[in-house]
Image (cartoon, rainbow, N blue to C red):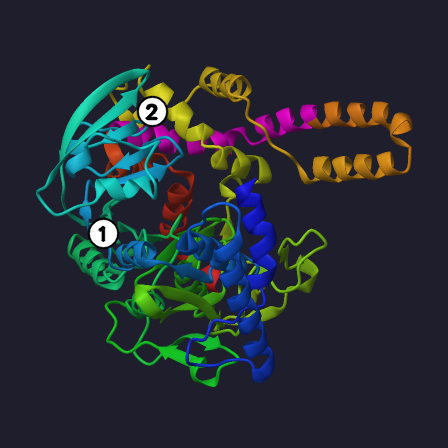
Amino acid sequence: MKNRFKRRLLIPIFAITILFTGTAFKSDFFEIAKQIEIFTTLFKELNMNYVDDINPADLMDHAIKNMLNDLDPYTKFYNEQDVEAERIRRTGDYTGVGARIRTLKDKLVVIEPYKDYPADKAGLKAGDEIITVDGVSVSGYDGDASDLLKGTANSKLEVTYKRQGKTNNATVTRSEIEIDAVPHFSMINEETGYIVLQKFNAKASAQTGYALKDLKTQGAKQIILDLRGNPGGLLNEAVNVVNLFVPKGQLVVTTKSKVKKYNKTYYTKKEPIDTSIPVIVLINGRSASASEIVSGTLQDLDRAVVVGSRSFGKGLVQRPKKLTYGTQLKVTISRYYTPSGRCIQALDYWNRDDNGNAVRVKQENYNVFKTKNGRKVFDGGGVFPDEAIEVTKNTAITDAILNSQSIFDFATKYYYNHKIEAINKFKLSDADFNAFKSYLNTTGFKFETETEKALKKALEVSKTENLDDDISKDYKTLLTNLDNSKAKAVEDNKKQLMNLLTDEIVKRYVYREGLYEYYKSNNEEIKTATQILSNSSKYNRYLN
């Protein structure tokens, strides 16, 4: 009740409050000053008179973040703790236990321990639920419980965790953690090099360049650059990665803003490593931002063939702005455009639908642009691959299952019930998929379609018009039919769900490094890329 009160009262107020960043602000200074004065007096009266004790810092943090949610998901306020987390994301360096952790209300869940880092050495595995850290209960911790895992290098912490219903203890020694932008590179065959670029932190271009040079010395005459699942990062690093394959002085990206000084053009500034080696870039629906700059630019310049499924569609650029007391505002300042002139932003956050949701640019509204060789490319919806692989495209049902953590939890269960000797030959069976479907049913997985939402809304309206008795029977029939359709949708997406399950299960046995090795002989996108590269005339047909 208290939280609902906070949201109801403060979101409208903060929605009209302006944060001054020192670069630009509205011309109507009186209106700004008026709204700030209204907010100041309200906040004072609220703190003095509200019936219960309230925490001004928490209230302000919550209200600011909710205000920014009305803009776009990338404009964010960072308190002091958030600033440190963002620094780690940019640099890839921190001191901790070396694992991806999900924070839940009453536990910390280990999502992925990094091989040979402290959590792994202490025996922690994906799916372990940490319930206490140094005697402090996660469920009773006031704040972000993942902070309990942080500390100085070589310091120890005692954790109590649950695994498959049993409670265990472990001692973890913290260490310096360096997260590689390129976690894997190797030869797929005698002529094909494979580079996985996982994120665009400060090490991205240097590590990608090192991998490229190393693979060339091993005999690589063609390269597969894997950007699948890469959420992006530093714009300059994206430019530098493109620069590895294109000459100095080439336009890579343009940013356009309402603030003149943010209108910039980014050109390659260094000598490239190789401007002629055939390149295939792999992307999917989770390749975003800087990944789209690299894949879109190499596509525009006809320097690479793009394979996979349509990328995420984030064509917005953010810049951090320092605020007082160690806080920051990361604000969307511009849109970026690839060399052909296209912006690949997919969602319109400024012209929302009746429910307040950002709308996707409709296909009939896409604009046509031309690559260097005259090929047609489009804006409005991410980077479209030159060779689309349908099975890699996420659908509403696969996204819902991924977001529910059902794949992760099933993989945990599978790992503790199966021994696998030859992981590179691992294949899930039809029986395994049926077990997964049963698991979805027994765990109460719910997926509400847009059709269901519309039907519920229609039923509510019918009640106000005294029509619900007449339509409730038909409504229930429609819901039953929808449930049958959703069950069919799971079956229709069997191949993709099997791939997602396989990825998560393989990681449990051989870590992420082993997953990339598994890909080299089993992954459909890599097989397709290798086939294209093995036929030079076919490769060149894509580019011409």
Is residue 501 inside the magenta stretch? yes
Q: Which residue is mark 2?
A: 426
**Can residue 35 be seen at all in this image of the molecule?**
yes
Q: Identify residue type, mark 1.
A: Asp
Q: Residue at x 45, y 32 (%)?
A: 405
Q: Identify residue type, mark 2.
A: Phe
Give the vertical position of 117 relative to 197 (above or below).
above
Q: Position of residue 430 (x, y in %)?
A: 48, 18
Q: Position of residue 497 (x, y in %)?
A: 49, 31
Describe the element under mark 2 as helix, strand or loop. loop
The part of the image, by quadrant, that contains residue 147 is: top left
Is residue 95 inside the magenta stretch? no
Which range of residues does the magenta coloring cover? 483-509
The part of the image, by quadrant, that contains residue 112 is: top left
Q: Residue at x 72, y 54 (%)?
A: 354
Describe the element under mark 1 as helix, strand or loop. loop
Give the vertical position of 542 relative to 101 (above or below).
below
Work out whether mark 2 precedes mark 1 in sequence or the reverse, and give the earlier one: 1
Q: Which residue is mark 1?
A: 180
Give the vertical position of 532 relative to 141 (above or below).
below
Q: Is residue 372 left or right of residue 448?
A: left
Q: Position of residue 121 (x, y in %)?
A: 14, 32
